[in-house]
Structure formats: structure tokens, C-alpha cells
Amino acid sequence: MKPQTGCEPLYSAAQVRELDRIAIEVRGVPGYELMTRAGAAAFAALRRHWPEARRVHVLCGAGNNAGDGYVLARLARAEGWYASVGWLAAPERLQGDARTAWEDAVEAGVTVAPFDAGRLTACEVIVDGLLGTGLQRGVEDDWAAAIAAVNASGVPVLALDIPSGLAADTGRVLGTAIRAALTVTFIGRKVGLYTGQAADHVGEVVFAGLELPADLAADMSPRSWLAGPDYAAARLAPRPRTAHKGAFGHVLIVGGQPGMGGAVRLAGEAAARVGAGLVSIATDPGQVPGVLAGRPELMVAGVTGPQELEPLLARATVIALGPGLGQGRWSRALFERLLRSELPLVLDADALNLLADAPLRRDDWILTPHPGEAARLLGCTTAEVEADRAAAVCRLQERYGGVAVLKGAGSLVCAGDGLWLVPGGNPGMASGGMGDVLTGMIAGLRAQGLAAAEAAVTAVWLHAAAGDRAARAGERGLLAGDLLAELRGLVNPAQGTAHDPHA
């Protein structure tokens, strides 16, 4: 994949191991020097995060992850800290640079002993150097017991490279995993730190490049891209002073069966709030008064069947199909008609469930399933989707074409030529209507001329950022409509409000 403006590359564990090998064998950086840099970077991050701390207990396993831990303990001891190590793999069995790190730590006066859960509460910070990125199977026995003791200790944890027990490529917990307050990851950012179950385990993620050359990965294609605020800002240029509403597209939102008018109303306002010039709603006739009363800027038409869509389609630029649609006769008739349209489509909710019943592939649509809908589209279980979210969204795109968005913690966007991971968001967004807002945002950005993948990634980032801003008052009780008030500031980066969702 080509470099992406406003994105950072994400790599698999195997790719990062290869970068490590290139640094040592091709670029000539000694392995122990890299290990020392890693330990130093982690210790510096620890001091910034916990400036009052002076007692650290490091847990070490059997590989280079343990070596990083021994280095950190030695550096802490050199600064006058009380530094101790509890090991689960006898250090006498260590090899190479990790063994050197252990020997140097002992020589520096670091206390090294077998793991003892009783020592966990005698320190101010625990450092997790148990299991690194190479973990492939479930954590068991003494290792699982140690992780459970750490998580129960109440002492904050810094994880080296990745929290032990978390799969580096998927973000899946392999039996049990450390719950860290801070994770310092080295050489390359790992996909699994940003999606799946990672949000419950990584805490704040700090990247340390270890002073390696910027072109180290020049010949390596990242597994995916981590989209940041600059991605959105680069695609939200200031408007010319002569702009008019006809220049920013006309979104048609279709859905809202009886009792579900709120879904199309949320989607419609979201499309308008991200800058669509015009927004029309096609809904059940009984929903028209409520939608108009809630947002009079929307144009709302009651439709009893697909024939009444024709004048609306003649004016539309993009169609968003699915919010509150249902799966009855009326819903299916509208769905079948709109699939024959040549306009770009954004599909969500029941439109995706109807698609799962009659699979179809096309190149000009954006599909926005949550994991349950994705499972129906793929004919598998939700657990299988969540076990490897990146693989699942790529399968969706391969099967159905266009652009696929897999919503959830660490949302993913897959197009034929790229995969993006979007961080941010919070548990308060697990409430009704959030998907309707996102659907409207994607359609609104698509109507303004953004390419399908750009519209999807930008909207997902803005959606998460708006949710995080709205959650300042508390996550519990957060409503989808609360995001709408935040969007106006976020989509105007030239005014200095879009770069930091927490500003």
C-alpha cells in the first residue's frame, strides 16, 4: 500500500520481527544495543507517566521481551530506584542478548527471584515483560496465574511491546491477558494494539522507534494504516467563499418503517452536519411529521412503494439505505429498487440483513456492518468475526466489493487497495442510533466528492472523535444525538478544532 497522508503504518508481529532482523543484520545495529534502547524508552515513558514512582517490580519471561525488562530494571537501579525482577522462566536458560541483559541487571544490584505474587503490592509500578508478540496459543498454568495476580493487585502496569496474553495480529485475548495502564511498543506499531479486545488491556499506547533509520521499512507494505486526525483534516479543505449548496451534493436517506422514524432523522441530520448541501428523507408516510419537527432543514417525503422514489432519485447524488428500514414487504420493495440504481450507495442495518439473504457484489457501495451483521453477511459466527477483525473486513470486501466498514472497538475500513484502522470511541457509544449517525456521515462526505474509502475512513474517525468529545460529561447515558452537536467543529479543521478531539 502507498503511504497515506495522516496515517501511521501498522505491522504484523512477523513483519516487526523482520524489521528487527534487518536492523541488526543489514543495518548493523547490535542486538543488545536495540534491547538497551527499548528498555531505556520504556523507563523514560514510565517516569513521564508516574513521575512520583521510585519502586518498580519487573516480571520477566523467556525471550527478548524479558531482556527488555531486565534492561529497564538495571536502568531504574542506576537511577537510585528500588528495582526487582520476578521471573517465570529461569534466567539461567536465557540465551543471547536476553541473557546478557539478565547478567548486567544482576551485576548492577537488581534483586532477581522467582515470581512471588506477594511482592506485587510492594512496588508502585509493575512492568510486564512476560510474553511478547510471538504468543500463538492460550496462556495457561503458572503464566495465567501470574497474570491473574497482577490484574488483581491494583498496582498500575506498564507493558513492554504488548500486554502479555494479547495477540499482536488480532487484538484477541489468548485465554487471559495483562490489563496495562501504559504500553510502550517498539520498532513498529502492531495491529493488535488497536482493535479487538485491545482497548481493555493496552491503556495508553506509546510508540518507540528506537532511533532506527526512517527508511528501514521502505520495502515492506504495512498490514494496515492507523488513521489519525490529520487524515480527516487533509480531506476537509476550507470552502471557497463563492460556494453554494448545489456544490456539496444531495443525500437521499431511505428507511424509517413505522416506529423507526428516529433512525432516518439521525442519519439525515448527520449528513447535513458533515456538510452535505441537501438532504432528503424517504420514509413511511406516518413518520414524516416527526422527522420534520425534529429537523426542519431536512426534506421529507412519505413513500408507500418504490415507484414514489423516482423523483427523489432524479435529484440525489448518494443514497443511504437501511436506517430503520425493517425487513417487511415495504422494506424489501424499496431495497430491491435501490439496488438497481446507478447512484453510489451506503448500506447499513436492515439493508445489510436483506443483502445477506440475497448476496450481491458491486463496486460503488459502502457497507457498514457491526460484528453481528458482518457474521450474517459472511455466513459465520460473531465470535469468528471478532477473533480476527482485520481478516473479517477483508473477506467482506472480497465477497461484496466496494468498501467495507467493520464497526466496533478499533473500527476497520477495507477497500480493494487498502486497509485502515481507526482508533478512538468509547463504551458510551454502545447505544441505539450510533450506526444511523455514522451512515449519514459517510453519505454526506461521499456526496461532497470524497472517494468511497476516503469518505468511510474520514467519517469513522469523525464519529469516534465526536463520541469522545460528547463523553466528557460521562459515558453512561451518551446518546447518538449527542454526537451531532460535536460534528460542526470537527469538520472545520481550518478553524483549529479538528486536530484534537479532546481539545
Image: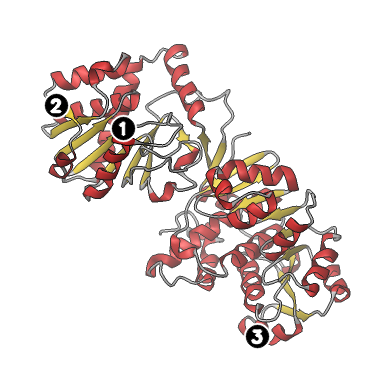
**Residue depicted at 56% across the width and 45% down the height:** 389
Gap between marks 1 and 3, in whole Å?
57 Å
**Residue depicted at 29% across the width and 44% down the height:** 148
Identify the disc placed on residue 290. Answer: 3
Gap between marks 3 and 2, in whole Å?
69 Å
Question: Is residue 414 shown left or right of residue 503?
Answer: right
Residue 294 placement: quadrant = bottom right
Label 3 crowd (10 A; few <14 / some 14-19 / many >=20)? few
Q: Residue 170's x, y, as percent? A: 51, 40
Q: Tell me which amino acid carries mark 2.
A: Val
Q: Is label 1 in contact with label 2 (beta carbons under 8 Å)?
A: no
Identify the disc placed on residue 110. Answer: 2
Q: Residue 358's x, y, as percent? A: 79, 56
Q: Which residue is mark 1?
A: 130
Q: Closer to the observer: label 3 or label 2?
A: 2
Between discs 1 and 2, the one toward the N terminus: 2
Do we see residue 242 in this rendering?
A: no
Residue 297 placement: quadrant = bottom right
Q: Residue 76's x, y, as percent? A: 18, 31
**Residue depicted at 41% across the width and 66% down the height:** 475
Q: Closer to the observer: label 1 or label 2?
A: 1
Q: Residue 441's x, y, as percent? A: 63, 63
